[in-house]
Image (tube, rainbow, N blue to C red):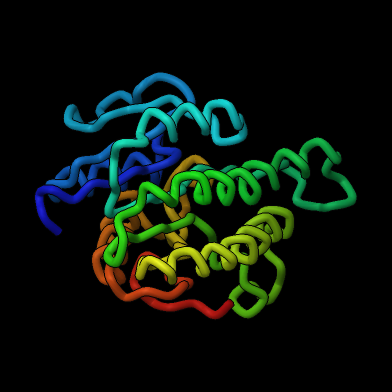
């Protein structure tokens, strides 16, 4: 990476998103990041912050318009949610399920599609945060079925983006962060935020300029769809 590398991180107010902002900034990147609320405490002074709720189409358009003169080496769509406490489709309400899929599936893909023109040709990386739980092969017992289903749908709706990224020689990634000690992952998770986000940043570097669409975890291991 060079000092001129630029990243746009969507959903960086805490946890993994903020961790990626910190790691990339430490590596000399110019980072623009989004948050729904106030700029998070302790964030790097050099980072540029923009307000965005990815479920709000007017805000998505405003962010795109504000950044229209920028070109990014990396666009990482990290925003997401766990969803209803009950992961049973028969117990969760319709509103809870629709909200989950809007946040984890439809809005991230819409956001990626709208921001894709800002990605640098040939070496640019477009990445979306998913989970190994989205895979029927990796998640054989259907752990957290509603959350997993929303991420499986995200993987499928991400795939059509490959046609556009292929045209410009860009790389498309679906990224699994591992089981991380965040509000979502809980204190018993096996990875710290620093371990996960350092690995994720390494993955971005490894796949730069490779092209195609790849399902990878923070360690660099490719996962089965």
Q: Is 60 or 185 nearer to us in this picture?
A: 60
Q: Residue at x 85, y 40 (%)?
A: 94
- Residue 91 found in image quarter: top right
- Residue drawn at x 26%, y 57% is 198
Residue 119 visible in the current orientation: yes
Left or right: residue 57 compared with residue 99: left
Q: Is residue 185 visible?
A: no
Left or right of 215 in this view: 5: left
**Between 9 and 183, the one nearer to me in the picture:** 9
Q: Residue 52, position in %: x, y?
A: 48, 29
Which quadrant: the N terminus? bottom left
Quadrant location of residue 222? bottom left
Q: Position of residue 8 (x, y in %)?
A: 34, 43
Image point 24% across, 65% down: which residue? 205
Question: On the picture, is 71 further left or further right than 102?
Answer: left
Q: Looking at this view, is 108 or 12 the one in front?
A: 108
In percent of width and height, residue 61 lies at 52, 31
Residue drawn at point x = 68 percent, y = 55 percent:
150
Position of residue 31 measured from the top left corner of the image (x, y, whole percent): 25, 40
* Relative height, residue 59 to residue 111 (above, below): above
């Amino acid at each position: 990476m060079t000092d001129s590398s630029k990243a746009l991180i969507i959903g960086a107010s805490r946890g993994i998103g903020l961790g990626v902002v910190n790691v990339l900034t430490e590596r000399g990147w110019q980072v623009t990041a989004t948050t729904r609320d106030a700029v998070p405490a302790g964030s790097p002074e050099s980072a540029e912050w923009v307000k965005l709720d990815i479920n709000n189409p007017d805000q998505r358009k405003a962010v795109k318009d504000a950044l229209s003169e920028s070109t990014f080496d990396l666009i990482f769509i990290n925003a997401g949610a766990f969803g209803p406490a009950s992961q049973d489709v028969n117990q969760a309400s319709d509103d809870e399920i629709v909200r989950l899929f809007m946040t984890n599936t439809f809005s991230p893909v819409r956001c990626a599609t709208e921001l894709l023109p800002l990605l640098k040709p040939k070496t640019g990386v477009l990445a979306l945060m998913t989970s190994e739980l989205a895979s029927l092969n990796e998640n054989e017992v259907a752990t957290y079925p509603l959350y997993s289903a929303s991420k499986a749908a995200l993987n499928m709706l991400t795939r059509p983006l490959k046609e556009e990224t292929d045209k410009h020689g860009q790389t498309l990634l679906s990224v699994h962060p591992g089981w991380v000690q965040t509000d979502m992952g809980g204190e018993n998770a096996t990875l710290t935020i620093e371990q996960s986000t350092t690995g994720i940043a390494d993955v971005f570097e490894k796949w730069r300029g490779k092209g195609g669409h790849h399902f990878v975890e923070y360690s660099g291991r490719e996962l089965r769809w």
